[in-house]
């Protein structure tokens, strides 16, 4: 007998407006496509209204990514690690499609490994940037640079790691969210919180 997992609390869903964003276009790519989900996410994370001011904000999108966007911030005695997983929507308008969440929930669960291997993650970011600069002649850093990561690598062994994971799916409507979607998000939250003490946040459309 498996106890039923509690569904995700729909009130905790963070709803953003996605004006002029193509909900079926996930990646900003090296072209920095302004109507992509990832581009809009990055711009929002740079705004003063976002509660964190990152030391590093990194576009890790692509094969073998840790997340679509990685945020790092050094506090007094902790290193804050934010992993953002974006997903394009199955249709051009927000709704209650369970299919919009399956893959991104899986990505959120798989990314927990990085919390325990923070040095590997920091090495990964540097390597990814070196390769990207060689390939497309521009950096993956949106805030900070390789020097910032090297500084964090020196301090990281002495800091407590606080990791939080974000699912970013503008194809999800907070108003229309279904019981099935909340169950799926609840299972993901339970996996992250109960097993790894990692908080899950969900960003959607209104």
Image (cartoon, grey):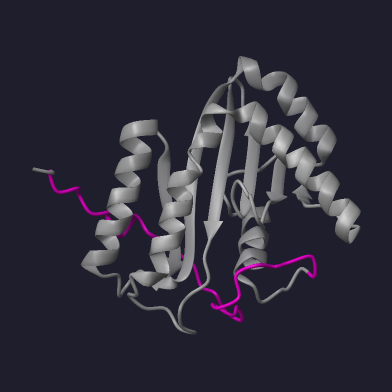
Point out residue 108 in the picture as x, y percentages from the top left corner: 46, 49
Q: Is residue 122 magenta?
A: no
Q: Taking 55 as reference, is 2 left or right?
A: left
Quadrant location of the C terminus?
A: bottom left
Quadrant location of the N terminus?
A: top left
Point out residue 147 in the picture as x, y percentages from the top left corner: 84, 33
Q: Nearer the viewer, residue 160 or 107?
A: 107
Q: Taking 179 as reference, is 14 left or right?
A: right
Q: Residue furthest bottom?
A: 92
- The range drawn in magenta is 3-31
Can residue 102 be seen in this snapshot? yes
Q: Residue furthest left?
A: 1
Q: Is residue 30 magenta?
A: yes
Which residue is at 34% across, 49% downward? 188
Which residue is at 41% across, 70% downward? 100
Which residue is at 63% across, 50% downward? 65
Can residue 173 be seen in this snapshot? no
Q: Nearer the viewer, residue 98 or 175?
A: 98
Quarter of the rendering containing residue 137: bottom right
Identify whether 90 is placed above or below 42: below
Point out residue 183 in the picture as x, y percentages from the top left corner: 24, 58
Which residue is at 45% across, 83% downward? 93
Q: Nearer the viewer, residue 58 or 62?
A: 62
Point out residue 107 in the picture as x, y percentages from the top left corner: 48, 52
Quarter of the rendering containing residue 177: bottom left
Question: Of helix, strand and loop, which mostly describes the magenta segment?
Answer: loop
Identify whether 114 is placed above or below 95: above
């Amino acid at each position: 007998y498996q106890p039923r997992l509690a569904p995700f609390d729909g009130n905790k869903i963070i709803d953003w407006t996605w004006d002029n964003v193509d909900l079926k276009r996930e990646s900003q790519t090296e072209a920095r496509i302004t109507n992509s989900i990832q581009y809009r996410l990055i711009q929002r994370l740079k705004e003063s209204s976002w509660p964190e001011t990152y030391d590093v904000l990194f576009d890790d999108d692509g094969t073998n990514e840790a997340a679509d966007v990685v945020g790092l911030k050094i506090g007094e005695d902790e290193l804050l690690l934010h992993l953002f997983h974006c997903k394009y929507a199955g249709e051009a308008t927000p709704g209650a499609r369970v299919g919009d969440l399956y893959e991104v929930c899986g990505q959120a669960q798989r990314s927990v490994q990085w919390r325990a291997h923070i040095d590997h993650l920091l090495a990964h970011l540097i390597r990814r940037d070196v390769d990207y600069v060689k390939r497309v002649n521009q950096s993956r850093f949106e805030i900070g640079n390789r020097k910032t990561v090297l500084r964090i690598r020196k301090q990281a062994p002495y800091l407590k790691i606080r990791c939080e994971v974000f699912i970013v799916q503008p194809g999800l409507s907070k108003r229309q969210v279904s019981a099935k979607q909340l169950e799926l998000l609840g299972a993901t939250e339970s996996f992250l919180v109960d097993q790894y003490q990692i908080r899950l946040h969900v960003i959607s459309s209104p």
